[in-house]
């Protein structure tokens, strides 16, 4: 995987394998590391104290994309002949109301092959996508009907550090409303309704965008991919852009909840397009126009998300903060602890 040179040793016990609620704490009681992007100063707290670090007039922008259960099981057919009885497909990216790019976890799939997921949901392979392990499939349903079937049949994507089959509800934020992400936009997971109301009571503005996350891992260690290969669909409103300009004009800060929000807002800043598809790659050379700070989880060694964080804070300060997080036994990944860079 072509990504940052930002490599470090992450002890396996710091991979969060259980949701906080199954570790005996509320989702908003995970730990919070606060990193000053200018001085590199680090402080340690809990996420439900987030209001202590934000000011009246700041704007917090969240991604309300809803996680879909992106693993489907089906039979593979060529004409009327069954080629394989049980094939796993992983949804990778929605192209239209009825068309998705998917990873078919099977050898020998050909153009025109048919996948039968249930008596009332099938799909046909319409494109083999040269140079990519992904294939395009056309489902027999579209729109809400298709999503209803996916929710009925699918399972959420789980990576190797997750040992138990946690249900889909554990992979949702409390404010998720627009289906489309194949992996949870996890930076928003630690928010509770109580914390959102607490932020509002302090005079902190809240707003929502959608960026539907794509499949980040294609099950091939040898495959070299770049963030520019990862196209993701996003939707913003004029109201959000107006709020950002108003916040900045009045001296407030725009805080993105997650790398997905940074990608969506900065894409709109670059292109002027409020609804589109982005493959924007943000790193230390990228001048952030829209976003002043970020709330994010902890990212694994060599992850391209770490490149994005160097647009906020010099790599040496980020490196020192990550070493401190390891020393303080912060937990990594979607069920882990949180980091505020401000």
Image: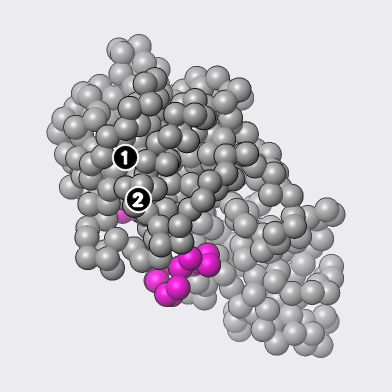
State yes or no: residue 159 in magenta.
Answer: yes
Figure check: 63 above or below 170: above
Query: What residue span does the magenta drawing correspond to?
Result: 156-177
**Crowdedness near tag 2: few (<14), some (14–19) or many (≥20) residues, C-alpha within 10 Å:** many
Q: Nearer the viewer, residue 119 or 129?
A: 129
| Picture quadrant where residue 280 is located | top right
Secondary structure state at the residue bearing disc 1: strand
Q: Nearer the viewer, residue 126 or 224?
A: 224
Which label number is shown at residue 184?
none
Residue 106 location, x and y as percent? Answer: 74, 74
Disc 1 and disc 2 in contact, CB within 8 angstroms:
yes
Q: Residue at x 54, y 58 (%)?
A: 182
Q: Residue at x 19, y 40 (%)?
A: 49
| Left or right side of 33 for 49 | left
Specify the color scheme.
one colour
The residue that disc 1 covers is 33
Residue 147 location, x and y as percent? Answer: 52, 64
Question: In this rendering, does residue 42 appear at all?
Answer: yes
Question: In this rendering, does residue 268 appear at all?
Answer: no
Work out how far the residue at label 1 is from the one at label 2, CA to CA, in angstroms. Answer: 9 Å
Q: Residue at x 79, y 63 (%)?
A: 126
Q: Earlier in the sequence, mark 1 or mark 2?
A: 1
Residue 86 location, x and y as percent? Answer: 67, 84
Q: Nearer the viewer, residue 87 or 315?
A: 315
State yes or no: residue 106 in magenta.
Answer: no
User: In what quadrant of the picture does the C terminus appear?
Assistant: top left
Secondary structure state at the residue bearing disc 2: loop
| Left or right side of 257 for 270 | right
Figure check: 24 above or below 94: below
Magenta stretch, main secondary structure, is loop
The residue that disc 2 covers is 330
């Amino acid at each position: 995987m072509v990504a940052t040179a930002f490599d470090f040793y992450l002890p396996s016990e710091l991979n969060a394998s259980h949701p906080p609620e199954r570790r005996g704490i509320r989702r908003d009681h995970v730990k919070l590391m606060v990193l000053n992007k200018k001085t590199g100063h680090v402080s340690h707290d809990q996420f439900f104290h987030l209001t202590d670090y934000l000011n009246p007039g700041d704007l917090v922008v969240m991604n309300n994309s809803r996680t879909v259960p992106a693993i489907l099981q089906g039979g593979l057919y060529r004409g009327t002949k069954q080629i394989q009885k049980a094939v796993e497909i992983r949804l990778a990216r929605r192209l239209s109301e009825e068309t998705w790019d998917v990873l078919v976890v099977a050898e020998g799939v050909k153009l025109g092959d048919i996948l039968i997921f249930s008596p009332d949901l099938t799909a046909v392979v319409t494109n083999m996508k040269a140079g990519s392990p992904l294939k395009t499939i056309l489902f027999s349903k579209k729109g809400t009907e298709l999503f209803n079937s996916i929710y009925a049949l699918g399972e959420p994507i789980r990576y190797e550090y997750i040992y138990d089959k946690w249900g889909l509800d554990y992979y949702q934020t409390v404010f998720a409303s627009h289906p489309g992400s194949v992996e949870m936009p996890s930076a928003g997971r630690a928010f509770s309704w109580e914390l959102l109301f607490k932020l509002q009571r302090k005079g902190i503005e809240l707003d929502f965008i959608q960026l539907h996350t794509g499949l980040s891992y294609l099950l091939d260690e040898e495959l070299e991919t770049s963030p520019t290969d990862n196209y993701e669909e996003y939707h913003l409103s004029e109201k959000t852009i107006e709020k950002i300009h108003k916040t900045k004009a009045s001296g407030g800060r725009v805080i993105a909840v997650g790398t997905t929000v940074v990608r969506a807002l900065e894409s709109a800043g670059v292109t002027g397009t409020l609804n589109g598809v982005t493959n924007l790659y943000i790193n230390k050379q990228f001048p952030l126009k829209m976003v002043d700070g970020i709330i994010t989880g902890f990212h694994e060694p060599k992850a391209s998300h770490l490149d994005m964080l160097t647009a906020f804070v010099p790599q040496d300060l980020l490196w020192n903060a990550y070493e401190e997080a390891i020393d303080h036994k912060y937990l990594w990944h979607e069920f882990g602890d949180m980091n505020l860079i401000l």
